[in-house]
Amino acid sequence: MAAGDIGARSFGGRAAAIINNPSVRGLVFQIAFVAALVWFAWDIADNTARNLQKANIAAGFGFLDRTAGFGIVQKLVYYTEASSYGRALLVGLLNTLLVAGLGIVIATILGFIIGVARLSPNWLIARIATAYIEILRNIPLLLQLFFWYFAVLRAVPGMREKWTFLGIFHINIGGLHVPRPVFADGAGTVGLALIIGVVAAVLVARWGRKRQEATGQAPPAGWIGVALIIGLPLIAYFALGRPISFDVPVFNDQGPILRRGFQAGSGMTVIPEFFGLLLALSLYTAAYIAETVRAGISAVGHGQSEAAHSLGLRNGQTLRYVVIPQAMRVIIPPLTNQYLNLTKNSSLAVAVAYPDLVSVGGTVLNQTGQAVEMVTIWMIFYLGLSLLTSFVMNIWNRRVALVER
Amino acid sequence: MKKLIASIVAGAALATAGVSAASAGTLEDVKAKGFVQCGVNPSLIGFGVADEKGEWSGIDVSFCRAVASAIFGDPTKVKFSPLNAKERFTALQSGEVDLLSRNTTWTMSRDSSLGLMFVGVSYYDGQGFMVRKSLGVSSALELSGAKVCTQTGTTTELNLADYFRSHNMPYEVVAFEKNEEVLQAYEAGRCDAYTTDASGLYAERLKLTNPDDHMILPEIISKEPLGPAVRQGDDKWFTVVKWTLFALINAEELGLTKANIDEKKTADNPEIKRFVGVEGDFGTGIGLTNDWAYNVIKGVGNYGEIFDANVGPSTKLGIARGLNNLWSKGGIQYAPPIR
Ligand SMILES: N[C@@H](CCC(=O)N[C@@H](CS)C(=O)NCC(=O)O)C(=O)O
C-alpha cells in the first residue's frame, strides 16, 4: 500500500516535472503555434479557392502556358505576341532585375560621393550635398519619376532627328541607339578569355597587396590587371578571326515621314522609359544612402582620423584606408535596407510604361482575371529577391564586422 | 508599390470576404445602405468625369443615376468610385462597387473567367488611331513601323497586337498605367500614334494643347461594345440593372422624355401605361416599385437625351449617333419590350 502510494506520487511528480520543464513547455507551445499557423494558412487557401469558385472566377496556374497576345517594348530574351504568359512574366522579371541591379550600383556610388561631400570641410560642397539630400528625400518618388521621365523626353530630339556622340551613340526620343553585338562561333571563347582576364586581374591585385604589405613596394598591379582584362579577350578576338561583329543602327532621313528615323530591327535601343526609371530610382535612393554613409563616417571616432593625419596620411588616404573601412560596419545594415527599398520602388515602373514584373503582371492579371495567382507570383518574386539581397549583404557584413581576437 | 499593395488588399478581400460580396443579394444591400456604389471612369470626358466641384457627368455616370432612380426614385442616391482600367474588375469582384459603368468592353473572357456579367450595350464603339497631321498618314494601314502609345489593362493592347500582326506590320507598343501619361507621352512625341476606343480618342484629343494638329484615322479595327457589368451569381441585381438599360432605350422609342413623361403618363397608350406602371405589375416583379421606369426617365431622361447631353453633336465631342441610334432610325440600339 505504502509502496503503491509512493509509486503514484512519484508518477504524479514526474508528470508535474515534465509540465513544469521550461524546454518541454516551450516545445509544446511552439508546436501548437506552428499548427495554428498551418491551419490558418490552409483555411485561407481553402476559403479563397471556394470563394473564387463561387464567384465563377478562374483559378490555377494553367494560364501561364496560354498565348499572351500583347507586345512588350523592352525584352532581354526572345518574346513575341505569340509567346506565353509565362514567358511574358519572365521578360518582366528580367527587366525588374536589370533596372534594380543597375540602380543599386549607381545609387551606391553616388550615395558614397554625396555622403562624403556632406562632411566636406569645403562650405559650398557640403551645402550642395545637404541641399541634394534634403530635396530628393522630401519629394515623393512618383513625382520625381514623372519629372525625370518627361524631362528626358522633352530634352532630346524627336523621332526623326538625332544627336550623335563619338560616331556610334545616337540619342533621340526613341531612346539611346547603339550598335548591337552579333555573336558568331568562337564568341564564347572571347567571353571565356574575359572571365579569365578578370580572375587573373583579381589574383594579381591580391599578390600586389601582399607584396606591398611585405616589402613596402607597390607593384603596378592596377595596370597589369587592366592589361589582362582588355588584352586577353582582344587576343582571343583576333586569334579567332573576329567572331563578334556589330549591327549598326540604321537611320533613314528620306522618304515618308513615318519611315524616317531609326529603323526597327537594326542596332540596339535602350528605351527612355528605362532611363527615366533608372535615373529616378538611383538619384532618390542615393540621397538615403548618402545619409547612411554620413552617419557611418560620423560614427568613427575623431581620434582615428587625427591619428591617421599625424601618421602623415593625406585626407583622401585617411578616408579610404582608415575611416571608410570602419564606417562600413555601421553602413552595411542600413544599406541593405536601401537596396531592398530600391528594388521594391522599381515597381512604380508601370507609371512610365517601363515593362517590369508588376507592369507585365498587371496586364496578365487583367487579361486572365487571375488576381490571386498573379499576386502570389509577385509576392514570391519580391520576397525571394529581398531574401537573396539580405543574404548576400549579410555575408558581406560578416566579413567587415569586428572580429574579436 | 501602391498598386501592388492595392492588388494584395483586393486579393485578401477575395480570400476572406468573397462570400458575403458574392452571394448576399446586392439589391437588398443597396436598399439597406440607401445608395448605389458605382465604378466609373475618373477622367473620360463624355463618359465619366468629375468637374472642379466634384460634380460627376457622362453617359456612364448617367447610367449609374438611372439605376439609383429605378431603385430609390432619386438619381442622387449614388456614390462614385473612380477606377482606372487595371483596377476596375477587381473592384467589382471584391464587392467594392455594386456596378461597373466605365466604358468597359463586353468580351467573352470577361463574361467567363473574370466572373462578370454584362447587362447589355450602352454604347457601340470600336478602336481607332489618332496621329499628328504632320505625319502625312491617312490610313491605319500606313502605320507600319509606328510606335504606338496606349493604356495597360484594356482590350486596346490586344487589338493593337492583333491588327499589326494580321497585317504583317512591325510596331512598338508603349503602355502606361494611367491615361494622363499616355497622352503626355504622345504629345511629347514618344509615339507616332495613340490608340484607344474611338469615343476615347475624341475625348482625349480635346485635352491636347492643339487638338487641330491631330487627326483620327478612318479605320475602326475592333468591335468595342461598351456596357455596364455586375458580378455573376446575383440574378435579381442583374435583372434590375439590365432592365434599367432597356427602360432608357424603350423610353426613347416611345417618345418619353424627362420633360414630357408627366404629361404622357396619362395618355391612352397601353405601352406607355405599362412603362409608367399604371398598368401591370412589372416593377414589383423585379423587386422594385411599379413606377420604377417612370422614375428612371424622370430622373435622367431617355437614352437619346443622355447621349445628346454628354457626347452628341451639340457637345464638345460632337459624336454622331451612328450605330447608337435606335434600330428604327438606322442604328442598332434595340431593347426587349416591357410587357
Ligand atoms: N473599352 C476598353 C478600353 C477602356 C479604357 O480603359 N479606355 C481608356 C482610354 S479611353 C480610358 O478610359 N482611360 C481613362 C482612365 O483610365 O483614366 C476596355 O474595356 O478595355
Image: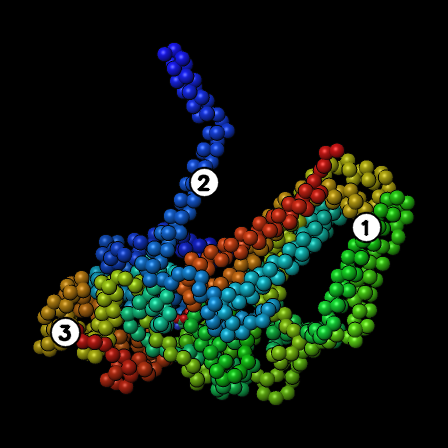
Residue under pointer 3: B339
Where does residue A366 sit, x and y in percent of width and height? Answer: 43, 65
Residue contact between numbered discs 2 and 1, judged by CB atoms under 8 Å: no
Q: Is residue A134 above or below residue A243?
A: above
**Amino acid at the residue labelled 2:** Val
Q: Considering only order in the chain, which callout, 1 or 2, is on the residue closer to the N terminus?
A: 2
Q: Nearer the viewer, residue A4 or B168?
A: A4
Residue A280 in view here: no
| Distance between the alpha carbons at the discs numbered 2 and 3 | 62 Å
Q: Please identify the quarter of the rendering in which residue B218 is found.
A: bottom left
Question: Disc 3 is attached to a residue of which chain?
Answer: B
Q: Nearer the viewer, residue B92 or B40?
A: B92
Where does residue B45 sit, x and y in percent of width and height? Answer: 39, 71
Residue under pointer 2: A34
Q: Is residue B218 left or right of residue A384?
A: left
Q: Is residue B144 above or below residue B338?
A: below
Where does residue B65 sit, x and y in percent of width and height? Answer: 27, 65
| Distance between the alpha carbons at the discs numbered 2 and 1 | 49 Å
**Amino acid at the residue labelled 1:** Arg
Q: Nearer the viewer, mark 2 or mark 1?
A: 2
Q: Residue furthest top?
A: A2
Where does residue B251 sit, x and y in percent of width and height? Answer: 20, 75
Question: Disc 1 is attached to a residue of which chain?
Answer: A
Answer yes or no: disc 2 within 8 Å of ligand 1: no
Residue under pointer 1: A206
The answer to whether marks 2 and 1 sit on the same chain is yes
